[in-house]
Image (tube, rainbow, N blue to C red):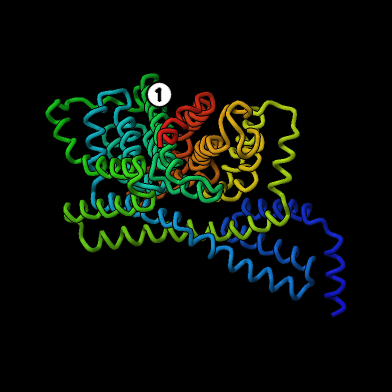
């Protein structure tokens, strides 16, 4: 008992804000050395809650309170209706893949743009953009087209690094183009409209795809050996490829149309899209083994995402008690620098973090701190366009920042040493006996880092690209 009393006295002299800084530093160390984000955040969050309540209530009662809160918060938050959208979006992508719909999409893109320099690379970019419109997961998109596009490019004499880099970078488009699981997670964390954020990602996703396509053409023009043109397709063959791509286009239309015109919530639109893809897959002759595979893969990815959300929610609750987000937002407001300079500094932090963390983990870990800071920088909640720093309301600022920060999260999918998309592409290539290493994929994806930076600057300079569609909702 004396030891417990001494411990309480020790904690009473500890400033909880400084403690949150130390624990956040420890969290970064744990993530860098390889501890899973879900477990690292849950551990640090629970430890912080224990120390906070022990300081207020003593050892025994504080421990019990922390345990209750750590158990209640993940359940209460993860049962949010909007989060049910995530598994439906993921399921759409896997059903489309197992039904073979992605091959038809790639074939159509190849016939229509293969004549360009690096034509198969351009076709891969546009096909991944199309598949991204029915798949909410970047990793799934990369894995699918590593099996479809890379063998085709290698057969046509494409450079293996170039081919692998195109697929790894093209897979990141699923982070922006709706339906996007990561945009849903952002909307839940910052408490913004899921429907508006999904619509906001549509045009930036297309801009990103066009910049990727332009980069592929430019590289192939400078070095024709990277990707020769594919010629010989007649106009009849091109038009004949369109019906095979039609199912995916129909699903995209259903999801975007239903959300835009308001006759279905995003969750209902996702469920409807999954049902339509399932009917199309069955019509194409999907077998029970393929359906089982799609369901299992969707379940695995869904569980991974929700586990990360649960861990981070515990950590975020501790940060709330420590007032770290509020203090950081107040501090940002006192800086005598241009708002755009501060924004770029925050984005540079995401570049560094992206080298050590996956996209979803990075966002749900940092947004509780960076989002209030950006809103404060813009002028605070309820600010008008005339009085704001970025020339937009607080809601518009939340949507605009969301698209930019998700685009920044895409960078971490192709940057070493984590670069999850690059590891997935290399893994699929090795399983398929293709001579492509992880180093080859990283080297091939390097030019696309510059394309992503260019896209971010375009979205910062022209926020209307982000805000036009949600403004019409």
Residue 83 falls left or right of residue 337: left
The C terminus: image quadrant: top left
Quarter of the image that includes the N terminus: bottom right
Q: Categorize mark 1 by other alpha carbons within 10 Å: few (<14), some (14-19), many (20+).
A: some
Please indicate whether residue 161 sits to the left or right of residue 367 in the image: left
Image location (x, y in percent) of residue 388:
62, 29
The one of 265 and 55 positioned closer to us in this rendering: 265
In this view, 406 is above or below 390: below
Farthest residue, direction left: 236
Residue 190 in percent (x, y) is at: 56, 47
Q: Which residue is mark 1?
A: 219
Given the current orientation, which residue lies at the most extreme bottom position?
1
Residue at figure coordinates x 54%, y 27% from the top left: 460
Q: Nearer the viewer, residue 99 or 157?
A: 99
Left-right relation of 460 to 159: right
Residue 446 lies, with reference to residue 370, above or below; the image says above
Q: Is residue 433 visible?
A: no
- At horizontal 53% and vertical 60% (from top left) the residue drawn is 77
* Residue 74 pos. (x, y %): 55, 63
Residue situated in front as seen by the camera: 339 or 120: 339
Q: Secondary structure at mark 1?
A: helix
Quadrant in the rendering for residue 227: top left
């Amino acid at each position: 008992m004396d030891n417990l009393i001494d411990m309480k006295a020790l904690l009473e002299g500890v400033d909880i804000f400084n403690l949150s800084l130390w624990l956040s530093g420890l969290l970064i160390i744990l993530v860098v050395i390889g501890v899973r984000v879900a477990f690292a955040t849950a551990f640090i969050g629970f430890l912080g809650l224990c120390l906070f309540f022990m300081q207020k209530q003593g050892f025994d009662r504080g421990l019990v309170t922390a345990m209750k809160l750590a158990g209640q918060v993940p359940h209460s938050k993860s049962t949010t209706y909007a989060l049910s959208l995530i598994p439906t979006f993921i399921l759409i992508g896997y059903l489309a893949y197992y039904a073979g719909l992605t091959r038809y999409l790639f074939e159509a893109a190849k016939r229509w743009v293969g004549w360009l320099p690096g034509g198969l690379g351009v076709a891969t970019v546009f096909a991944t953009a199309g598949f991204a419109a029915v798949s909410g997961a970047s990793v799934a998109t990369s894995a699918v087209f590593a099996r479809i596009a890379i063998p085709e490019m290698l057969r046509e004499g494409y450079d293996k690094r170039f081919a692998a880099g195109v697929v790894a970078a093209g897979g990141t488009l699923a982070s922006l183009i709706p339906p996007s699981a990561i945009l849903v997670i952002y909307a839940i964390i910052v408490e913004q409209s899921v429907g508006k954020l999904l619509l906001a990602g549509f045009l930036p996703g297309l801009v990103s795809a066009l910049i990727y396509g332009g980069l592929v053409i430019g590289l192939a023009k400078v070095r024709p050996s990277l990707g020769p043109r594919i010629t010989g397709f007649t106009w009849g063959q091109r038009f004949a490829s369109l019906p095979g791509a039609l199912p995916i286009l129909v699903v995209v239309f259903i999801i975007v149309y239903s959300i835009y015109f308001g006759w279905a919530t995003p969750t209902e639109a996702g469920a409807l899209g999954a049902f339509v893809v399932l009917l199309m897959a069955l019509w194409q002759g999907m077998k029970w083994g393929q359906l089982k595979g799609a369901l299992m893969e969707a379940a695995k990815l869904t569980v991974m995402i929700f586990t990360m959300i649960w861990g981070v929610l515990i950590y975020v609750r501790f940060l709330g008690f420590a007032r770290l987000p509020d203090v950081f937002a107040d501090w940002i407001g006192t800086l005598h620098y241009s708002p755009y300079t501060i924004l770029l500094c925050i984005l540079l932090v995401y570049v560094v973090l992206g080298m050590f963390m996956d996209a979803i983990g990075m966002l749900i870990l940092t947004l509780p701190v960076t989002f209030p800071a950006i809103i404060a920088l813009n002028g605070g909640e309820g600010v008008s366009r005339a009085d704001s720093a970025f020339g937009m309301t607080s809601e518009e600022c939340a949507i605009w920042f969301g698209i930019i920060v998700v685009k920044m999260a895409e960078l971490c999918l192709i940057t070493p040493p984590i670069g999850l998309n690059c590891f997935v592409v290399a893994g699929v290539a090795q399983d398929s006996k293709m001579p492509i290493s992880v180093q080859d994929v990283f080297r091939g994806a390097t030019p696309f880092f510059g394309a992503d930076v260019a896209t971010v600057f375009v979205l910062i300079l022209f926020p209307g690209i982000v805000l036009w569609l949600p403004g019409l909702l």
